[in-house]
Image: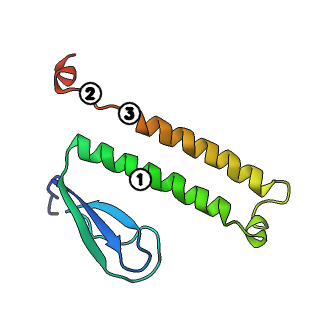
Amino acid sequence: MKKEMPPKFMMIYLCSSCGLESGYTENDKPVCRYCDATTSMKLISKQELTPEVMAARLKKVTDNMLFNLQSAFESMTEDDKKLFPQDKDAEKEMLLLLDKAKKFKDDVQSLELKKQEDKNQV
């Protein structure tokens, strides 16, 4: 079995069907994480894989997550609300989810990388 080399690059691809981005390393085959369409993925960014690049990507992903949840809440139809269990208020459940997602996003956004000298101390 061939051993895979550790990744060196963060590569961001844009889906030509849904227009959303997906991040991979050079060791991964890019496929859209969001739509089921067989589509092409256009490379839009290639950066050396560093803690700073990974942190920036994580922050962008949490921004997108919250934006998409807010959009889903705002566009929720009566048919969508029927998908929730009968004993649950769909709008209330979505607001609770949005609150948790916002707290998670805020926690991720406030993360700071340790400085190199901090890493070397035991």
**Relative to 33, residue 47 above or below:** above
Crowd rating for badge 2 (residues with CA inside 10 Å; few <14, some 14–19, many 20+) = few
Measured in 3D between alpha carbons, the distance from the residue under mark 2 to the one under mark 1, in whole angstroms, is 21 Å
Q: Amino acid at mark 2?
A: Lys
Tell me where residue 13 appears, x and y as whole percent: 30, 68
**Relative to 72, residue 122 above or below:** above
Q: Residue at x 17, y 63 (%)?
A: 1
Q: Quadrant of the C terminus?
A: top left
Sooner in the amino-acid sequence: mark 1 or mark 3? 1
Outermost bottom residue: 38
Q: Is residue 80 left or right of residue 2?
A: right
Q: Amino acid at mark 1?
A: Val
Q: Residue at x 81, y 53 (%)?
A: 88
Q: Please state the total of marks drawn on the protein image.
A: 3
Tell me the element at label 1. helix
Q: Residue at x 41, y 53 (%)?
A: 61
Tell me where residue 107 appears, x and y as whole percent: 47, 35
The image's mark for residue 33 is none
Q: Mark 1 sits on what residue?
A: 61
| Rendered image quadrant of residue 33 | bottom left
Tell me the element at label 3. loop
Q: Mark 2 sits on what residue?
A: 114
Crowd rating for badge 3 (residues with CA inside 10 Å; few <14, some 14–19, many 20+) = few
Tell me the element at label 2. loop
**Relative to 53, residue 12 above or below:** below
Cβ atoms at labels 2 and 3 below 8 Å apart: no
| Rendered image quadrant of residue 121 | top left
Q: Mark 3 sits on what residue?
A: 111
